[in-house]
Amino acid sequence: MKPTAERIADAALAAFGTRGYEATSLDDLARELGIRKQTILYWYPSKEALLASVIDRTTGEVMVRLERAVAAAEPGFGRIEAIVRAMSRLVARHPAMLGFVREVSRLGPPASTRLTRAIAPLVDRASGYLAAEMDAGRMRRHDPRLLLLAAYSMVTGLATEVEVLRAFGEEPTLSSLIRRRNELLSLLRAALVP
Amino acid sequence: MKPTAERIADAALAAFGTRGYEATSLDDLARELGIRKQTILYWYPSKEALLASVIDRTTGEVMVRLERAVAAAEPGFGRIEAIVRAMSRLVARHPAMLGFVREVSRLGPPASTRLTRAIAPLVDRASGYLAAEMDAGRMRRHDPRLLLLAAYSMVTGLATEVEVLRAFGEEPTLSSLIRRRNELLSLLRAALVP
DNA sequence: CTTGCTCTCTACCAACTGGTAGACGGGCTT
DNA sequence: AAGCCCGTCTACCAGTTGGTAGAGAGCAAG
């Protein structure tokens, strides 16, 4: 079996990402894992420390995936497509992960700063790349940072808003996720490719 | 002064929308208002009932605004622009409102069903309109429902993700909100107008 | 003045929160 | 065998949670 600390972090990611941080008690978490709350507090000195650790694991995972996706993609719109596909795969494998990212950003400092500080350099690189592409005329001109934020919002929205999705007549299945991913790409392509 | 029940609902909207539902205790709410928790429970028999009431007020408010915006707009992309502008104004006046909508959708049933059931007919009408526009060749073809969901995600994202916004180098000021609104419109126009 | 109604209050309560203190067992090294 | 960590446990704790019971103030009608 996986080490206890890791099992705790996995369960915490899922619980924080779906039910929310405050709504998840250490007792709930422990019950799910078949252990006692005090075992959690042995591995993580406090609930906040557990949150911080889960944030670090998650940002690490996301960064690695994005890094790899960008490196393997051909330049131009291909990079954007690669990023969207990578995030889509991530959501399919770890459905709670993007929900967790959103939850952390909602919690505000100090949790959110931990996340944003880790992602900031990536945002800088991405917006620099986008600006260069626009300057070269290979993409329509938009504010790179706001474009990124809009894209991020669309990805998390299309991936995590299961309830709103239901109201829109979409079921949270894998094939539906793929359809949403393709639709998102077609939307982005229409907006960006001149 | 406003009636007590209304003051409670206003404070609850702000608190639920920013701090979250579970993270807001009735004692917190009462302290903010300068009353006792039991006064809240006199007007609303339980915390859940308070939530339900706030949901109803919010959906009502949003629906009225969208209704008016659509009615006053000229057909074509003008309607989309009108909707975005209406939502933007709403956010400027009640910053917590969209955050609250997102929070409710995260809480899941039965709270979320109350919201989605109210909005569903509006979604149907909107996607029907979009489909007709696409059929007539006045808009590029996309899946109408997914397009709506993507737009909704962008609006809420650009409006509410203050923390992520900060990481992207945007300050949550009014002028920045307007810039974000304009950018969103230009993005949508690029994606939709053939 | 009395009655009755509306509203807010004080006084509780059981359940649960994150966290502390320390016992217990099982395996490792000496 | 003896001691020593390591990991998990039981037993508690003070503070907070949503919610109940009921007192009392203010006020209008009889």
Image (spheres, coloured by chain):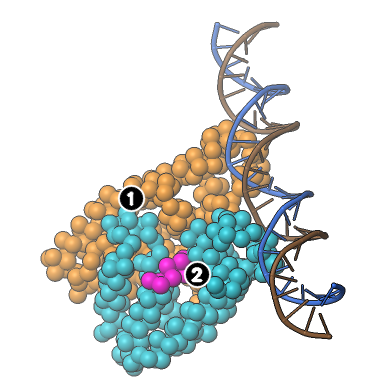
Chain colours: A orange, B cyan, C blue, D brown
- The answer to whether the residue labelled 1 contacts the one labelled 2, judged by CB atoms less than 8 Å apart, is no
Residue located 38% across and 80% down the image: B86
> In the image, residue A61 lies at what x, y percent?
40, 47
User: Left or right: where does residue A59 sit relative to residue A70?
Assistant: right
Residue B146 forms part of the magenta stretch: no
Q: Quadrant of the C terminus of chain A?
A: bottom left
Position of the N terminus of chain A by quadrant = top right
How many marks the image carries: the answer is: 2
- Of marks 1 and 2, the one in the foreground: 2
The residue positioned farthest toward the left in the image shown: A136
Residue at figure coordinates x 53%, y 65% from the top left = B11
Subunit ID for the residue under disc 2:
B
- Give B58 or A111, whichever is nearer the viewer: B58
Calculate the distance from the C-alpha at mark 1 to the C-alpha at mark 2: 26 Å
Percent x, y of residue A152? 36, 62
Q: Nearer the viewer, residue A121 or B60?
A: B60
Q: Say if residue B141 shows up in the picture.
A: no
Q: Position of residue A88 (x, y in %)?
A: 41, 61
| Segment colored magenta | B91-101
Decide: few, some or many residues near mark 2? Use Cα within 10 Å; few <14, some 14-19, many ≥20: many
Q: Of the numbered discs in the image, which one, if any, rests on residue A119? A: 1
Determine which quarter of the picture holds residue D24. Answer: bottom right
| SS assignment for the magenta stretch, majority | helix
| Badge number at residue B101 | 2
Residue B193 is situated, as x and y percent measured from the top left of the image, at 27, 84
Q: Secondary structure at mark 2?
A: helix
Examine the rendering and report whether any part of residue B168 can be seen.
yes
Mark 1: amino acid: Ile
Q: What is the three-letter code of the residue carrying label 2?
A: Val
Q: Disc 1: which chain? A: A
